[in-house]
Amino acid sequence: MALPELSAEQRRQALAKAGEARRTRAEIKELLRTGSLTLGEVLERADGDEIVAGTKVAALLQSLPGLGKVKAKRTMEELGIAENRTIRGLGSNQRAQLLERFT
């Protein structure tokens, strides 16, 4: 399947939108890393912000202080969360388990 042809303006807009999404996700992860934002606050933000909702859970957990790739992966396995899951894709039980574990 061929990709659609984009005009120069459409391509510029798509690049700007993608850049904004990357900046927003990086900011959220940095705020988590420094403790300025809690996991609960991020999950609340995801309810109203599509960019935050599209953040991978693994990347979010790795941003928590004291959690690296291995502990984040192990936690996700224990809670039954797929590696490629985004915040948007979390079920209510998975959200509750994450909050219980990291609050």
Image (tube, grey):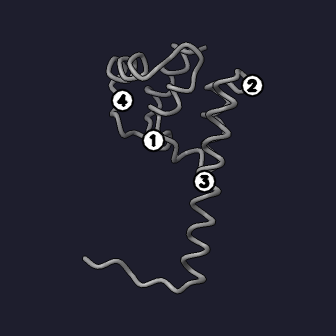
| First of labels 1, 3 by sequence position | 3
Label 2: few (<14), some or many (≥20) within 10 Å?
A: few
Mark 3 secondary-structure assignment: helix
Q: Return the residue at label 3.
A: 21
Q: Where is residue 49 drawn, in percent x and y?
A: 64, 49
Q: Return the residue at label 1.
A: 86
For marks 2 and 1, give the one nearer the viewer. 2
Q: Return the residue at label 4.
A: 81
User: Three-letter amino acid code at disc 3?
Assistant: Ala
Mark 2 secondary-structure assignment: loop
**Residue at the spot x=65%, y=47% of the render?**
24
User: Three-letter amino acid code at disc 2?
Assistant: Ser
User: Three-letter amino acid code at disc 4?
Assistant: Ile
Q: Where is residue 56 drawn, in percent x and y?
A: 47, 39
Q: Where is residue 102 drawn, in percent x and y?
A: 56, 15
Q: CA distance from mark 1 to mark 3?
A: 14 Å
| First of labels 4, 1 by sequence position | 4
Left or right of 15 on screen, residue 6: left
